Amino acid sequence: MSMSKLNLLVLAVHVLLVFGFASAFAPTVPGAPRSSVAARMAASTEDSTLALQDSKGNDVQVGTIVKIVAEGLKAYQVSGKGFGLYEDGKFVPAAEGVERGLKNLALPVGMTGIVNKVYNVDEVSANHPIQAKFQPGKYNDESGLDPPVKFLMHFDLKEIEAV
């Protein structure tokens, strides 16, 4: 390949990279197609009235207090202080140096948190469209099941209910 063709190819790649990535962050014009990044960002919301219904028909939207109703759920995205399980309503930390399979927080039925994001399932194929935040000392007055650490987790609608 001659030097001028190589330079032209390098220039074309740079133009595609710059304009391809930049278009994802460009302001959108009403009616114009969105980039895939912008579409994914718009499909999740932290402040709209988008609501989905839980198994009892209650609206679940940003700001809704929800409780866990499914058994056997585990949170892997918690810090090491949060590894463990609940026995008789009390958190029991995992032993130090446990095998990788036990490095999680076994979530008890009844623990409550607050919804901070809802994904529009018509725009994004989210199989866990509800994101809830759990925080020590918040939202758990009735259940008494206080999480050991703050964490976020995505849920399917059959795993939670509005309180």
Image (cartoon, grey):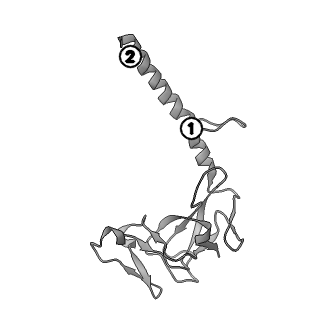
**Residue 25 image label:** 1
> The disc labelled 2 sits on which kind of residue?
Leu
Give me the residue at 56% from left, 80% from top: 110
> As rendered, which of 118 and 140 lies closer to the eye?
118
In the rendered image, residue 92, in percent from the top left (x then y), is placed at: 38, 82
Work out whether 10 lies above or below 158: above
Corner quadrant of residue 154: bottom right
Work out whether 42 lies above or below 110: above
- First reached walking from the N terminus: tag 2 or tag 1: 2
> As rendered, which of 88 and 127 lies closer to the eye?
127
Between the residue at mark 2 and the residue at mark 1, the CA separation in whole angstroms equals 29 Å
Q: In this rendering, would 43 be left or right of 86?
A: right
> The disc labelled 1 sits on which kind of residue?
Phe
In the rendered image, residue 67, in percent from the top left (x then y), is placed at: 59, 75
Give me the residue at 63% from left, 48% from top: 42
Work out whether 23 lies above or below 5: below
Corner quadrant of residue 118: bottom right
In the rendered image, residue 11, in percent from the top left (x then y), is placed at: 44, 20
Which residue was labeled with disc 2? 6
